[in-house]
Every structure is written in structure tokens, then in C-alpha cells.
Amino acid sequence: MPSVKTEEHHDKAMGLDVMHPALALRLLASGQQAAAKVVDAAIESIAAAAQIAADVLSKGGRLAYAGAGSSGLMAMTDALELPGTYGIALDKVVVLLAGGAASLTDLAGGYEDDMELARKDVRDAGIGAGDCLISVSASGSTPYALAAADEARERGARVIAMANNPGAVLFQNADVAILLQTPPEVISGSTRMGAATAQKIAFNMFSTLVGIHLGHVYDGHMVNLKADNAKLRGRRAIRIVSDIAGIGATEAGRYLTTSSGSVKIAILLAAGAEDVAAAQAALTESRSKLAPRLVWRHGTLILGF
């Protein structure tokens, strides 16, 4: 049976409960830092996973996240950020957290052991061919995560697996396996710490690369954000249009009003698109990507065709 590193005892944790608080915190911080470093070894697999997810979304499919406990929370956090950050439609992102809303008040419940619940959740969500499910588990053997991945695969979905132990059962038959080989936890078995930290970083990287592939990032700006509150409409969206187009905030605001809040359309209008319809046609032709359409010439941003 493969070694379960996430359950082993940390060799520097002896006496943690009687350490000076500052020393204890330094040890905890070093554990978090060590967890973050393991993500480097998973870059190629994260890249492969992001390509699959982007391909699925670009063809109208859905991206589903499945997990239990702390791992499920990491997955849910990433999923919930996608619509606001990258403007991905709400109905294209599915969250399967073991126990659903009940887990938000009783995370330690027995939901993670319920394999039939996982299968039912996948079926009820309609996950199948043309979709992608990313299933996450620190140990790589959580029954809910295993059953969700298995059910999704049987129904024709692409499956990405993320776990913190080499040889994890969850990796079997996955299209892409993301191994985040974190060292033993400072608090033995508390995978909300090191393992979850590595998962959060990996998810951040994964979803950001998905957004880049879909054309929702331009020069480090979130150009497909959903400007649905005063902060986003009044400051962030205006700043993005202003920065990219090289125009003042007032002018950027006017273009955003004309574009009904679409940052991409506003940028294309600023670059010389005749009207909203012409800007939308340019985006459709470039598969929603700004890069092929924008050219700087003599210090002015223009539409390049």
C-alpha cells in the first residue's frame, strides 16, 4: 500500500503544544511554505488540465469540481470565483461538495464516505460527455471524490484528479493526474493546512490558465470580468479599459456605458471599432480573444485586421 504522507507525523512537531507561540508560528509558517513549493513539480500536469478544461468550456461544455471536507472547500472556492473573475457563465460551472450546504455547518460529517451520494450528485448535475470534472482529495482515496470521478468518467466526461499522495487511487484512469506531494502536516493529518494550501495554489494556477486560454486575460488584466457591482463598474472596469486603451477614465467610462459594461467591447470601441456590433463581430472572429485584434501604432491602440 502506498505511503500516505498526509497522515505521517511531522519530525519537528514534537512539543509543539508547549513551544513559545512565536516558535510555533514559525514552524507552522515553514509548513505552509514547504507546501507551496511542491506545486512547482506539478506545473506540467496543471497545464494539461487547464487545456482540457478550456477546450471543454470553449465548446459549450461545463466544468465541474468535486470534493469533500477541506479539499472540497478549496475546489468550491475556485469554482465560485470563475464567473466573477473571468465572466464564465454560471451554468457552465458546477460545484459538487460532499453534503452540499449541510457541509458548510458540519464539515466533519460523514458525507465524504458516501459513494452513492457522489454518484447521485454527478447524475443530478447532468455531468456527461462534453463536460469535465476535476475531483480533489488530499489522501487521494476519499470515497466521495473517487465515486464522483468514476461516475463522471462512466458518463463520458473528461476527468482531472488532484491529490497529495503519490500512487493515489484517485489518479487511476484520470485524463490528467495532478500530484501535489506535500510533506507531513505540522498537525498530523490536518490536511486543511499544508495539503489544502498546495491545492489552493494549484487551483489558482489552473483556473487562471483556463481564463488565459479562453481569451479572458489580456496583459495581466481580467478583460472578461462581470462588472456587477459599484466597485467593478466604477473603478476596476474603467481602470482596465483605461490602462489597455491608453485613454482617460472619463472616456473609458463612456465606452463602458456604450458596451453595457463589457470590458472587451469597450476596449475595441476605444481602438476604433465602428460600433458595438462591429466590435462583437471582431471578437467572434477571434474566438473572444483581444490579442489578435489590438495593435499599437505610433502610440495609439488600433484595431488590427
Image (spheres, rainbow, N blue to C red):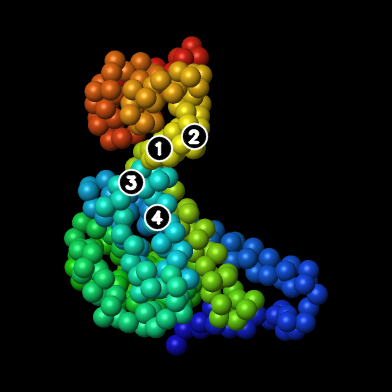
* Disc number for residue 80: 4
Residue type, numbered disc 3 = Ile
Is the Cβ of the residue at disc 1 closer than 8 Å to that at disc 2? yes
- Count residues near mark 2 (Cα–Cα under 10 Å), then give few for <14, some for 14-19, many for 20+: some
Which residue, given by chain and number where applicable, does mark 2 sit on? Answer: 236
Which residue, given by chain and number where applicable, does mark 1 sit on? Answer: 227
User: Which secondary structure, mark 2?
Assistant: helix
Q: Nearer the viewer, residue 38 or 56?
A: 56
- Quarter of the image for the N terminus: give it: bottom left
* Residue 36 percent coordinates (x, y): 58, 61
User: Which secondary structure, mark 1?
Assistant: loop
Of badges 4 and 1, the one in the foreground is 1
Residue type, numbered disc 4 = Leu
* Residue 293 percent coordinates (x, y): 35, 25
Distance CA(mark 1)–CA(mark 2) = 8 Å
| Horizontal side, residue 246 vs residue 54: left or right | right
Is the Cβ of the residue at disc 4 closer than 8 Å to that at disc 3? no
Distance CA(mark 4)–CA(mark 3) = 10 Å
Residue type, numbered disc 2 = Arg
Of badges 3 and 2, the one in the foreground is 2
* Disc number for residue 88: 3
Q: Is residue 207 visible?
A: no
Q: Nearer the viewer, residue 101 or 139?
A: 101
* Residue 202 percent coordinates (x, y): 48, 59
